[in-house]
Structures are given as C-alpha cells and as structure tokens.
Image: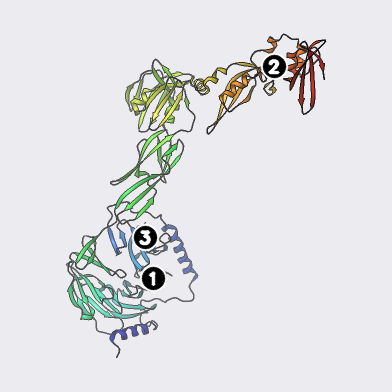
C-alpha cells in the first residue's frame, strides 16, 4: 500500500495537468498566441525606459554606519542606503547601489531587487554587471518565482510581464530539496487561497480575514489579522485547522515540515506537521520580529525588534553586521607632474568582508593641502596649476589616505632676477604664476591669489598687504629691466619658501618642496655659456681669416667667433664653431667631438689665418685676385704659389747652372702637375 507522501506527490503531478476552472474571478488569461500591438508597444517602452534609467556604476557603500534591512542568507543582504551586497560562485563578493527597498531570492544563482520607483532588477550573481531591468507601477514585493505583486493587487510575471492574478495580497514560493522553485501559493484580499504548479493555478480554499501566506509543498499556513494561523491543504479537501495564535510573522523551516511562527511577545515557536502541529519554543530567541530561512545553506536568520539581524545556530545568535570600510588607499596616476598636466586619482576600498572596490573619489572627498599647486576637478582629476609639492588627501568619516604630488615646470628658466643692496629681487608675475597663483594687475597694483592667501603689492611701496594685514618688505616693489620685481623674502614670510642666490651665475633659486624655480639675471646667460665652454670661452670674440673653407665666405675674408655650440647625445658631445662673416651673416663650421678639436681647427693655417693676410703680405690686388682664383703665374714666389694651389704632394731638389731648383709635384685624380722654382721664383709650370 502506498504511503500518504507518495499519494500526495502523485496527486500534485495530476493536478499540474488540470486546466484552471475555478479562479475566473481573480485569474486572468495565461499566454495566448496573439497579443494586442498596443500592449506589446507599451511593454517594450517600459523595458527600454527601465534599462536606460537603471544603470549605475558598481560602487561600494561609502558609509561604515549602514545597517542591514533585509537578509536572504549570509552572502546576500540589503543595506538601509539601498545597497545590495552579494557573492557569486565565481565572481566573489560584489555590491551595487540601486536605491533598492527590497530583495528576494530567484534561485541559487539569481537575485531580485525592486525600488520605490517601480524598477524590478534581476541579477545573475556571477554576471552582476549586466542586470536585467524592467519597469512596473507600484511594486509591493517580488517573489521567488519572479512574480511581481503591485499595489493594485495585480500579480505579474517578471519574465514576460504577463498578468496572472488579481486582488492578491501575498504570495509564497516553495523551493524543493533541489533548490528549485517548484510551486507557489497566493492569498487574495477576500481570503481565497490559490495553488499554482506547472504554470497551472487553481483555487484551493478560503481563509477569511487572512493577511499572510507561507507554503510548504501542498500545505499553506495563513496568518489572519487576529494573529491566528490556519493550515490549508491545497491538494486534499482536508478540514482547515488552527495551529497557533498571537502570531505576527511566519515561515516554513525548509523541507522539515516545521512551521516557524514569531509571536507578538518576540518568542519563536515551531509547529511540526508530522507531529500534529505540536508547538515547541525555540531556545535563545527573544525580541524577534521575523525569521528567514536560507534553503541552500540550511540556515536560519532572525531579525530582532530593534532591526538588527543575527544567524540562529542551536539556540545561539551570531550577530550579522553590514560590511565596514576597514581601509582606504588613495592612488595617483603619477606622483610627479609638470604644470598643465592632469593627474587621475583612484580610491581603493577594503571592506571587512574581504570585498575590494576601486572607484573614483568625489571632489568633496579630496583635500589639496596647497591649492595653488593643483585644483580638484570632477571625475577624480587634479589639474596641475603651479610648481611645488602638495599633499593630496582622501577623507570620509574616520578613513583617510594621502599621496604627495611633486610638480615641476617644463618651461625654460625665468628671467628678471637681480641683487640690490644685498637683497634678492624677483619678477612679480612670472614667479607667482609659476607657483600657481593668480595675478591681476590694476594699474600699479598687483592683486595675487596664492592658494588660500591674498597678497597685494604696490609699485614704489615697501609695504605689502597679506590677508588684509600689513607686511614690511626688505625693499620697494620696483621696475628693473622692463619687469616689476619684489623682494624675494616676501615668499619666506608668506609661504615659507626659501630663495637662494647663486653668485657665480648671478641667478636666484626658488626652493619649492622637492622642486625649484631658477630665475636668471641679465648676466646669467653669458656666465652659463662661459662655464659650459671652460677654456674654449677664450675664443669667443676672436677673429680669423678664411683660408680653405669657402663655405664660410670668400677666401681671406674676416670671420669672428660668436659662439661655440655643444650638442649632447647621451655621453657623446660634438662641437661647432659659429662665426659672423664679413657680410654680417652667421655661418658655422663643425670642429669635432672633443674640446681640443676646436683649438686644433682654429690653429690650422690650412683652414684659418690668425691675422689679416692682406696686411701681412703687401702684394698687388692683381696677385691676390689670381690667388683667390687659384691661378699660378710665372714669377710668383713660393708663398703666393702655396696660397694659390695649396701644399704640394711632394717636393724634390736639384742643382743647376741657374742655382738651386725646387720641384713641387701635385698628384690628384685629375692628373699630375708640377711647379719649378729657382731661387724662390716660379720659373716652370708643367
């Protein structure tokens, strides 16, 4: 003979094949082949609207004082600021703030959430970044089957937004031992109890004045307004029985056939269906408001009357608290920057439950110690505005984290410094602007906003206004070399910035944190050049006369050294001598890769004469013209011939009746030529 449980299971399967015949008053038509175009358009519109307005970036709860208001299990809960915390099988802990007012379990891998604005969201816990969102009007609650109960009593499916019932006040889903939602029951405002299995729904009884329903298999427990609990068999026409009173909330304890009720006095009682609902108080539970059962973990959770949540374990309560922010770390895309750069900030948050979140800090969470150095912008950006060093701090509640930003300038050194009567003077506008200050000129007055400080300088005055207080300077603000300058000691008095004078190069050095600003005087450039060239500086200003390098100008014309350029490539250097020729044109000649190559080039008589050859040799202009044209004629002396044709390839000597004969041979790719000299005069040209 079959036992009762086998008979119940068989009847459940049979009833799943029946068509709905008894619920025409509250149950609407199920899926039909044809739907009105108007309704389809409306639903699509709601869907698109919901998707557009629902997306917000993943972000952790910013407050460590948040409280848990709803629990599904130890891995899934809702905080009072609308933030959902969850844990996927592969994704680990994640969180999103969607301003939720409630959550429910879809299955072991999915969660539903809903908002006061009527958005219903379904998350796959391992793909939380792509939730499915749909829009409804006046959501009361979403149940495990994906059933959405609205304020007007209509019950809809989340998947297709089909209406499945009317006048409903509560729904209860039943999850079997595999964790799958296999059936559900619904309670109407008139007390009718409906049972749904295999997408078929039928009326299973009536409990007048009912307000809540809980399902376990084919049994439903209905809580009435008077606090009593009635058991309804949804498969058999068994007589309804009252099992408890003074109850304010109830659930079934999974597949144990035990009904858990929370009494008005805060105690929790168990009623076992297999023991004819004999009541038994659960130890260690007082001041309870409601109980929650987590099927997959087989755990019980209790919400106390003060709103706190705890896990119930064999008579002992273990408090369940919202994740707290344990540590924050502020990161910068770069700790070294130049004026004009943008630095990106990122905040790393570490929570007590092991969750690690990266997000962009809000402007109001960032403090820049030296606001003239960098300015806070939206999107976690810092706009670098001035040279110096500043601490950048993130602060929320009692959590802080800082980074140090060092700012330099890519621009070349400033100019306009000078030393007067033992005091260093610096140009007003260029120095303060490089430091990140805003300078407004009004006639002879300079109004300077330097971070949080305000400085006013007046030409001709030795008194400055610093935050509306008088400050005595070490000299007057005045104009030198076309720039308005101020005594540099003002920077020390107002910002603690030291200024040093380099007597060797006659320039000032403004020390700002780990950076510095060099401000040259009118003499600095020449002194720097002299220092760089070392002994080669003695050639600057010297004049030479061209011998062989006609690219510099006409032969024997004068050129004057105006500069010696040094080009650097890693450890290698090259030297080029710059001249100004007789026509006033700047020309240059490459000397070589060492300082000595400059000396050798200028001392080489084949390239340059160190004195004016026209004055050294008092020859006729026609002779000079021939030499310049590289022509030789009989009667020329050896010096003239050498200047015309250059040094010979070889020289041989003979003695004749005419005296000593000297033969110069010139060999080249064009052939061989020779000159013969007797007693120093050209007598033969071969």
Sequence-wise, the earlier of marks 2 and 1 is 1
Residue at position x 70%, y 11% from top? 614
Q: Pinpoint residue 493: horizontal percent, then vertical percent.
A: 33, 25
Q: Is residue 605 depicted above or below 96 in this figure? A: above
Comparing 636 with 680, the one in front is: 680
- As drawn, the label of residue 581 is none
Q: Is residue 583 depicted above or below 304 in this figure? A: above
Of the 4 image quadrants, the one containing the C terminus is: top right
What residue would you read off at disc 3? 92
Q: Dot 3: within a 10 Å radius of its alpha carbon, few (fewer than 14), some, or many (20 or more) residues?
A: few
Of the 4 image quadrants, the one containing the N terminus is: bottom left
- As drawn, the label of residue 556 is 2
Badge 1 marks a residue whose secondary structure is: strand
Residue at position x 72%, y 8% from top? 618
Q: Pinpoint residue 255: horizontal percent, then vertical percent.
A: 28, 76
Q: Is residue 245 depicted above or below 503 in this figure? A: below
Badge 2 marks a residue whose secondary structure is: loop
Q: Is residue 140 left or right of residue 648?
A: left
Sequence-wise, the earlier of marks 3 and 1 is 3
Report the Cα–Cα distance between label 3 and label 1. Answer: 32 Å
Residue 476 in view here: no
What residue would you read off at disc 1? 156
Q: Pinpoint residue 17: horizontal percent, then vertical percent.
A: 39, 83
Q: Pinpoint residue 133: horizontal percent, then vertical percent.
A: 42, 63
Comparing 205 with 487, the one in front is: 487
Sequence-wise, the earlier of marks 3 and 2 is 3
């Amino acid at each position: 003979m079959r036992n009762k449980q086998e008979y119940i299971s068989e009847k459940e399967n049979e009833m799943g094949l029946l068509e709905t015949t008894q619920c025409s008053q509250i149950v609407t038509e199920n899926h039909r082949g044809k739907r009105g175009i108007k309704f389809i358009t409306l639903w699509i519109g709601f869907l698109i609207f919901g998707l557009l307005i629902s997306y917000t970036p993943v972000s952790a709860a910013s407050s460590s004082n948040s409280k848990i208001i709803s629990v599904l299990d130890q891995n899934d809960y809702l905080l009072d600021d609308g933030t959902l915390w969850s844990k996927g099988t592969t994704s680990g802990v994640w969180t999103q703030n969607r301003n939720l007012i409630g959550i429910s379990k879809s299955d072991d891998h999915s969660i539903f959430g809903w908002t006061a604005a009527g958005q219903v969201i379904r998350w796959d816990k391992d793909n939380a970044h792509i939730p499915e969102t749909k829009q409804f009007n006046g959501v009361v609650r979403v149940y495990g089957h994906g059933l959405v109960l609205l304020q007007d009593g209509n019950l809809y499916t989340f998947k297709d937004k089909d209406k499945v019932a009317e006048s409903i006040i509560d729904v209860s889903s039943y999850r079997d031992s595999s964790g799958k939602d296999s059936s559900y029951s619904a309670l109407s405002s008139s007390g009718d109890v409906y049972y749904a299995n295999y997408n078929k729904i039928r009326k299973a009884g009536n409990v007048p004045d009912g307000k809540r329903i809980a399902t376990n298999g084919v049994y439903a427990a209905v809580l009435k307004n008077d606090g009593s609990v009635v058991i309804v068999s949804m498969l058999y026409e068994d007589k309804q029985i009252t099992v408890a009173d003074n109850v304010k909330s109830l659930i079934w304890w999974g597949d144990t056939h035990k009904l858990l009720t929370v009494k008005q006095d805060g105690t929790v009682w168990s009623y076992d269906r297999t023991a004819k609902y004999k009541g038994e108080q659960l130890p260690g539970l007082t001041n309870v408001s409601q109980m929650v059962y987590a099927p997959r973990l087989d755990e019980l959770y209790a919400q106390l009357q003060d709103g706190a949540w705890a896990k119930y374990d064999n008579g002992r309560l273990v408090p369940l608290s919202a994740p707290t922010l344990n540590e924050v770390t502020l990161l910068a895309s770069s700790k070294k920057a130049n004026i004009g750069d943008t630095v990106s900030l990122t905040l790393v948050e570490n929570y007590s439950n092991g969750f690690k979140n990266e997000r962009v800090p809000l402007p109001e969470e960032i403090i820049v110690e030296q606001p003239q150095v960098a300015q806070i912008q939206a999107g976690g950006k810092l706009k670098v505005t001035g040279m110096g060093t500043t601490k950048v701090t993130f602060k929320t509640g009692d959590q802080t984290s800082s980074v140090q930003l060092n700012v330099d300038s890519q621009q070349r050194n400033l100019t306009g410094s000078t030393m007067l009567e033992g005091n260093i003077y610096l140009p007003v506008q260029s120095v303060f602007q490089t430091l990140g200050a805003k300078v407004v000129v009004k006639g002879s007055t300079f109004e300077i906003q330097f971070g949080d400080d305000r400085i006013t300088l007046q030409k001709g005055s030795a008194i400055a206004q610093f935050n509306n207080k008088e400050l005595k300077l070490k000299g007057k603000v005045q104009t030198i070399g076309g720039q308005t300058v101020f005594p540099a000691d003002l920077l020390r008095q107002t910002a603690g910035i030291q200024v040093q004078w380099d007597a060797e190069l006659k320039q000032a050095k403004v020390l700002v944190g780990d950076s510095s600003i060099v401000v040259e005087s009118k003499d600095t450039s020449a002194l720097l050049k002299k220092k760089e060239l070392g002994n080669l500086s003695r050639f600057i200003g010297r004049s030479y006369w061209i011998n062989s390098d006609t690219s510099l100008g006409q032969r024997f014309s004068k050129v004057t050294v105006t500069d010696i350029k040094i080009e650097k490539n890693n450890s290698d250097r090259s030297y080029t001598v710059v001249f100004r020729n007789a026509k006033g044109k700047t020309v240059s000649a490459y000397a070589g890769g060492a300082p000595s190559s400059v000396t050798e080039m200028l001392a080489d008589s084949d390239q340059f004469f160190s004195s004016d050859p026209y004055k050294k040799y008092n020859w006729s202009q026609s002779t000079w013209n021939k030499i310049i044209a590289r022509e030789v004629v009989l009667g020329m002396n050896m010096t003239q011939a050498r200047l015309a044709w250059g040094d010979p390839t070889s020289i041989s000597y003979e003695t004749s009746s005419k005296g000593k004969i000297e033969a110069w041979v010139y060999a080249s790719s064009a052939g061989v030529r020779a000159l013969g000299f007797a007693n120093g005069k050209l007598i033969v040209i071969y």
